[in-house]
Structures are given as structure tokens and as C-alpha cells.
Image: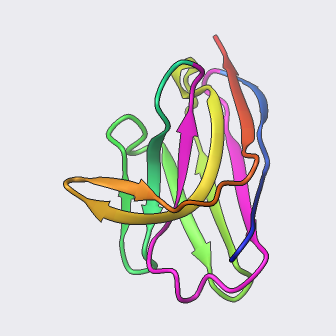
Amino acid sequence: QVQLVESGGGLVQAGGSLRLSCSASGSIFSIVAMGWYRQVPGKQREWVAITTGENTYYAESVKGRFTIARDNFNNTVDLLMNSLKPEDTGNYYCNAGARYLGTWLPGSSWGRGTQVTVSS
């Protein structure tokens, strides 16, 4: 099973940018959809951005501000976050994704995530 390690989080002011990186211990070539999810304390984990390589999908709340990119050669999935807002604060995780009834369901194995805090 591929292990995923997230990095790049931090504290940033509203309007700032961060680049998150997900490094996989093995090949992600055969994983059709890879993406980023976030969780805020007290709320359910939600998908943020998904890439199949050919297509990208974004949650409405981040569309136009976040960009996801995968590198199958280096087994990484990055998330560039611009124009950050306080409501983007949360712990961000990468994982596989499966399309289901208009949303994306994550795989079963989670990394530790990386914390993003946006101050107003």
C-alpha cells in the first residue's frame, strides 16, 4: 500500500499563498484520481481538488484560487493555493479519489496531513 506524506503547510496571512506537496512511497501511476482533502475541527473531511492527469476538479469554494498538479514520474501531487482566506484553515491531506454521486470519496489510508492556518 502506498504511503502518503504531506508537507508545506504553515501560517499565512489572508491573501497569501502556500504550496502543499504530497510525496508517495510508491508509484501513483496506476491510481486514476489523486487529490487533496481538508478537515476543520468539528467538521467532516471534504475534498478540495482532484486530478486524474487529464482532468482536474475543484470544490466551488477554491475554484480559481487553487491549482492541483500530479507528477507520476516523481510520485508527487502538489496543491498551489493562492488568495488564501481564513476559511481555508484546516489540516490538508492527500489521498486517492473515487467519483461517487457528484462528490469524491477518499481512499482508506491517510497520512498525518499538513496544517494550514490563514490569519485575517
The quadrant in which residue 40 appears is top right
Name the spot of residue 99 as percent of width and height, x first: 30, 64
User: Above or below — where is 45 with respect to 32?
Assistant: above
Q: Residue at x 67, y 31 (%)?
A: 16
Q: Is residue 120 left or right of residue 61?
A: right
Figure disc tally: 0
Q: Residue at x 46, y 31 (%)?
A: 44
Residue bounds of the magenta highlight: 14-41
**Quadrant housing the N terminus:** bottom right
User: Above or below — where is 18 with respect to 51?
Assistant: above
User: Above or below — where is 109 with respect to 73?
Assistant: above
Q: Residue at x 74, y 83 (%)?
A: 26
Q: How is the image coloured?
A: rainbow
In terms of depth relative to the viewer, which is nearer, 48 or 45?
A: 45
Q: Is residue 27 left or right of residue 57?
A: right
Name the spot of residue 104 as percent of width and height, x first: 36, 55
* 63 magenta-colored: no
